[in-house]
């Protein structure tokens, strides 16, 4: 019986590990910044700081989870292809959550900008003599 093969070769595993390490660092910074922002928001009664903190913490946690799944791909080297696929899909699932959140935040921001733009231009038309 042939031993199970890994999907990724050593150079590819190095790339995956490097990505995982960088993602882990970014996630720690985001979580830390979110906690600090949340504490500041609680003491200053600033709801926008609390919302920002929650978003930063969510992004940090999802990034950390994705980084952990990517690292598992490298750590389970020598195991089956199934483990690599499961770990890769876990990482992609976390990234999907992250980019789903960013997608909706951008949509909300663009709609808000459009509303503010049209609200401000309607005031300009009031000052133009006919």
Image (cartoon, grey):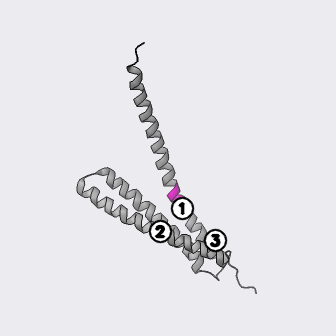
Task: State the predominant SS element of the stretch in magenta.
Answer: helix
Asked if residue 102 is positioned above or below residue 77 in the image, the reply reads: above
| Quadrant of image for the C terminus | top left
Would you say 114 lies left or right of 14 here? Answer: left
Asked if residue 93 is positioned above or below residue 125 in the image, the reply reads: below
**Which-is-in-front pick, marks 1 and 3?**
1
Question: Mark 3 and 2 residues: CB-CB less than 8 Å, in contact?
Answer: no
Asked if residue 75 is positioned above or below residue 34 in the image, the reply reads: below
- For the point 37% across and 66% down, which residue is it? 32
- For the point 52% across and 56% down, which residue is it? 99
Q: In the image, is residue 127 part of the stretch drawn in magenta?
A: no
Report the span colored magenta.
Answer: 93-99
Question: Mark 2 and 1 residues: CB-CB less than 8 Å, in contact?
Answer: no
Q: In the image, is residue 97 part of the stretch drawn in magenta?
A: yes
Helix, strand or loop at mark 1: helix
Q: CA distance from mark 1 to mark 3?
A: 15 Å
Which percent across, then down, holds residue 119?
41, 30
Pointer 2: what residue? 64
Helix, strand or loop at mark 2: helix
Pointer 1: what residue? 95
**Which-is-in-front pick, marks 3 and 2?**
2
Disc on the earlier residue, 3 or 2: 2
- For the point 48% across and 64% down, which residue is it? 62
Packing grade of label 1 (10 A; few <14, some 14-19, many >=20) is some
Which percent across, then down, holds residue 39?
28, 61
Pointer 3: what residue? 85
Disc on the earlier residue, 2 or 1: 2
Q: CA distance from mark 3 to mark 2?
A: 18 Å
């Amino acid at each position: 019986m042939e031993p199970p093969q890994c999907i990724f070769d050593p150079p590819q595993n190095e790339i995956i590990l490097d990505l995982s390490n960088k993602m882990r660092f970014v996630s720690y910074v985001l979580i830390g910044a979110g906690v600090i922002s949340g504490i500041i928001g609680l003491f200053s009664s600033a709801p926008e700081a609390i919302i920002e903190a929650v978003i930063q913490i969510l992004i940090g946690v999802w990034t950390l989870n994705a980084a952990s799944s990517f690292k598992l791909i490298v750590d389970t080297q020598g195991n089956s292809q199934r483990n690599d696929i499961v770990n890769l899909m876990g990482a992609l699932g976390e990234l999907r959550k992250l980019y789903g959140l960013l997608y909706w935040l951008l949509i909300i921001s663009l709609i808000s900008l459009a509303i503010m733009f049209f609200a401000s231009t309607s005031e300009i038309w009031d000052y133009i003599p006919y």
